[in-house]
Amino acid sequence: MRTELVWLALLMGAVTYPWRAIPLLVPGMHRLPAGVRTYLRFVGPAILAALAALNTIVVTDAARHTELHVGIEWVAVGACVLLVAVRGSLLLGLLAAAGIAAFARALG
Amino acid sequence: MREDLPALTNPSDLPPVATLAEVVASRRRLRLDSLGMVASGIGFGLVYGLAARAAGFSVIEATAMSVFVFAGTAQFAAIGYVLGGFSWPGVVLLTAFINARHFLYGASLAPYLSDRPRPIRALMAHVLTDEAYALSIAHFRRIGRGDERGYWWAAVVTEFIPWNLATLVGAIVGGQIPDPSVYGLDVIFPASMAGLAVGLIGGRRELVAALVGAIVGVSVALAWDPAAGVLAGGLIGPAVAMVVPERLHAH
């Protein structure tokens, strides 16, 4: 069986790991100045919202070209956000989102 | 929505440490929240395995990507690069770029995990993904401290095991796999990210960070590249939130 790309996987892992590990392993990350701690408090909402918006509104082809996408995904994700905000249940929101998308696609 | 909570573990910032019952309740919610992501991880792990095989990867190569890289976006992109005949240095450089957002995740989680032994944190780092971050930061903020057991659940039980098993099955079973989008599984990822973002919004500054992060992220993605969009949204959103006053004062 071919194993050549295992080396590529190792190299890709080697350049990914430092991004993940450096902040967790560098001493003093828990003794940051107040301003930096406040900034980091906002990273979660910002980056999760960016990921959500990008994966709903933007489509990327194999060559990583992007374009704006309008579709049922907007409604599905919006329904999830609404349910989480009102009912506080992510699971319910995800079930609703998947159901809406599946139902709309089944209808064509 | 919940009351605003300081997120990081400077002892003077923290709310009273959660009681055992509160930690147990938060872990239960973490497990419930993770169910949809497990389904999504399995669906797309299967598709990744299938796509990798279709691109000429062997079963070992497809599985090695999931074990060593363990980053879905970069892995799907790598299939495209290999098919497109990119050089290895190019693939590695683009992977580093796509995965740079993990630095922000690590920085945000570090204060919660600083009391864990260094080898444990080194292991935690390898399994830090979008989903693991989203689930664990929400859990840590609910209980006002880090929780190693909660982190392992979010990272390993929810993502690492399902993704790797599904990759293996996808690579072996191949073309018998149905398209996950038929079942709406493709919207689980953005919906879970959006839902968890809502859970982190406790005040107007978090709301501003989320809105600006989303707008900047989409704009940069459309103008340049999705990976740059996520990074830009994650960097600029919090910066704008910093200049917003906590609440309006009545005149």
Image (cartoon, helix red, strand yellow):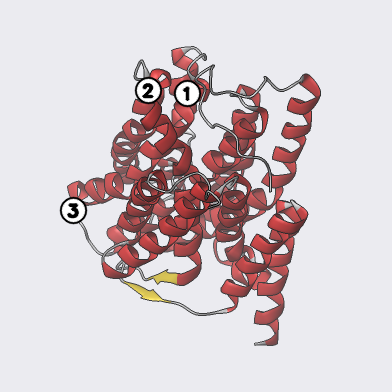
Q: Residues within 10 Å of mark 1 (few under 14, many from 20)?
A: many
Mark 1 or mark 2, which is nearer to you? 2
> Where does the image place residue A100, in percent across and percent down from the top left?
70, 73
The CA span between labels 1 and 3 is: 38 Å
> Mark 2 — residue?
A32
Classify residue B134 by image quadrant. Answer: top right
Q: Position of residue B79 (x, y in %)?
A: 36, 58
Percent position (x, y) of residue A21? 38, 28
Q: Which residue is mark 3?
A: B87
The chain carrying label 3 is B
Please state which amino acid type lies under the numbered disc 3.
Ser
User: To which residue does mark 1 refer?
Assistant: B111
Q: Are marks 1 and 2 in contact (CB under 8 Å)?
A: yes
Q: Amino acid at mark 2?
A: Leu
* Residue name at image x 67 percent, y 28 percent: B143
Instruction: Tell me the subunit letter for badge 2.
Output: A
Give the secondary structure at mark 1: helix
Q: Chain of mark 1?
A: B
